[in-house]
Image (spheres, grey):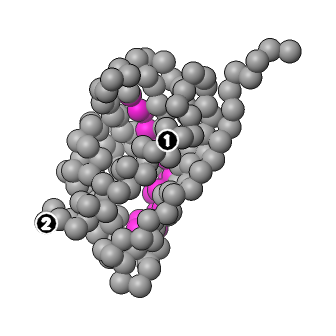
Amino acid sequence: MSATTHQHEQFTLERVYSTPRDKVWAAWSEPEKKAAWFGNTTSGLEFRPGGREHGQFNDAMGMHTNETRYFEIAEGERIVMAYSMALNGRVHTVSLATVAFADEGAGTRLTYTEQMCVIPPSDGVEGRQHGWGYLLDALGSFLKGPMA
């Protein structure tokens, strides 16, 4: 029998922001706002069902590329998207992600859930958790600023 060539993982991250849901939603759906907290690495954000998004960034490991497709967008409530991550042109994770938005007092509870196929070699679930944790914290900082 051959070695495992892939594995499936899942994780969930939650954040509670003191910002009302419509402003948190706008930070995901408006290109200039998303670029401000997402690291300005995306291009061609088509925030609609069937829409696409492309992102790239460089670090010590090389060129990271993600390709995203939006499948469902329920205004102010839910985003369902699938995306791949590649390093130097080789895809190493493919994911289905759901971002849910709910009122939490005067603020917003955001729940990010990802199911993924990891294709070794890869930083796998740890890499995605770290990356999305960083991005959701960056979103929190953005929401406290004047652009939100």
Residue 108 tag number:
none
Taking the spot 25% from the left edge, 65% from the top edge, the residue there is 143
Measured along the vertical axis of the image, is residue 11 above or below residue 57?
below
Location of residue 27 (image quadrant): bottom left
**How many discs mark residues in the rendered view?**
2
Q: Quadrant location of residue 96?
A: top right
The residue located at (33%, 34%) in the rendering is 55
In the structure shown, which secondary structural element does the residue marked by tag 2 occupy?
loop
Which residue is denoted by mark 1 in the rendering? 128
- Farthest residue, direction bottom: 105
Q: Which residues are magenta?
A: 65-81
Q: Is 36 displayed left or right of 100 in the figure?
A: left
Examine the rendering and report whether any part of residue 31 can be seen: no
Which SS does the magenta portion mostly show?
strand
| Coordinates of residue 45 in the picture (x, y in percent) | 30, 43
Q: Is residue 71 left or right of residue 33?
A: right
Amino acid type at circle 1 is: Arg
Residue 46 position by quadrant: top left
Q: Secondary structure at mark 1?
A: helix
Which of these two is toward me, 116 or 16?
A: 16
On the rendered image, what quadrant is the C terminus found in? bottom left
Residue positioned most to the front: 60
Label 1 to label 2, Cα distance in Å?
Answer: 29 Å
* Residue lying furthest left: 146
Horizontal side, residue 18 vs residue 91: left or right:
left
Residue 146, labelled with which disc? 2
Residue 92 drawn in magenta: no
